[in-house]
Image (spheres, rainbow, N blue to C red):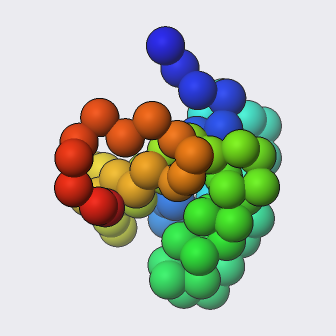
C-alpha cells in the first residue's frame, strides 16, 4: 500500500536537489545541496505523520531509503 507521506530527494535538471511527492506537479522544496534537501525531506515527512524518504543519486537511481517516525519500518535496524 502506498503511503501519501512518502517523498523523494532527486537531482533537479537545472541544478541542485528537489524534495518531491510522488505524482506531484512540482517539488515540495528545492535546495542547493543534497544534504539540505535530505534534511528538509525528513522534516516534511515527519510533520506529515511519518513515512519513507527515498534518496536518489545523481544518476536518478535510489541509493538509500529512510523511514521517518512514526512510519512502519519493515527492518529491525535503524536507517
In which image quadrant can residue 42 be found? bottom right
Residue 59 is left or right of residue 53, and the answer is left
Residue furthest top as drawn: 1
Q: Is residue 14 something one can see in this rendering?
A: no
Rendering coords of residue 21 (x, y %): 66, 41
Rendering coords of residue 70 (x, y %): 57, 46
Q: How many marks?
A: 0
Rendering coords of residue 24 (x, y %): 73, 35
In which image quadrant can residue 16 be found? bottom right
Q: Residue at x 52, y 54 (%)?
A: 68
Q: Residue at x 77, y 55 (%)?
A: 47
Judge by depth and name the residue closer to the eye, 76 or 62.
76
Q: Is residue 68 something one can see in this rendering?
A: yes
Rendering coords of residue 53 (x, y %): 49, 52
In which image quadrant can residue 5 be found? top right
Residue 78 is left or right of residue 18, and the answer is left
Using the image, determine if residue 75 lies above or below residue 53: above
Q: Residue at x 61, y 34 (%)?
A: 22
Using the image, determine if residue 78 lies above or below residue 36: above
Residue 30 is left or right of residue 52, and the answer is right
Quadrant where the C terminus sits is: bottom left
Amino acid at each position: 500500500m502506498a503511503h501519501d507521506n512518502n517523498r523523494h530527494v532527486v537531482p533537479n535538471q537545472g541544478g541542485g536537489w528537489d524534495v518531491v511527492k510522488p505524482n506531484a506537479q512540482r517539488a515540495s522544496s528545492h535546495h542547493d545541496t543534497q544534504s539540505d534537501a535530505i534534511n528538509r525531506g525528513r522534516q516534511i515527512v515527519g510533520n506529515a505523520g511519518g513515512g519513507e524518504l527515498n534518496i536518489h543519486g545523481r544518476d536518478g537511481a535510489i541509493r538509500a531509503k529512510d523511514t521517518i517516525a512514526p512510519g512502519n519500518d519493515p527492518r529491525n535496524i535503524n536507517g
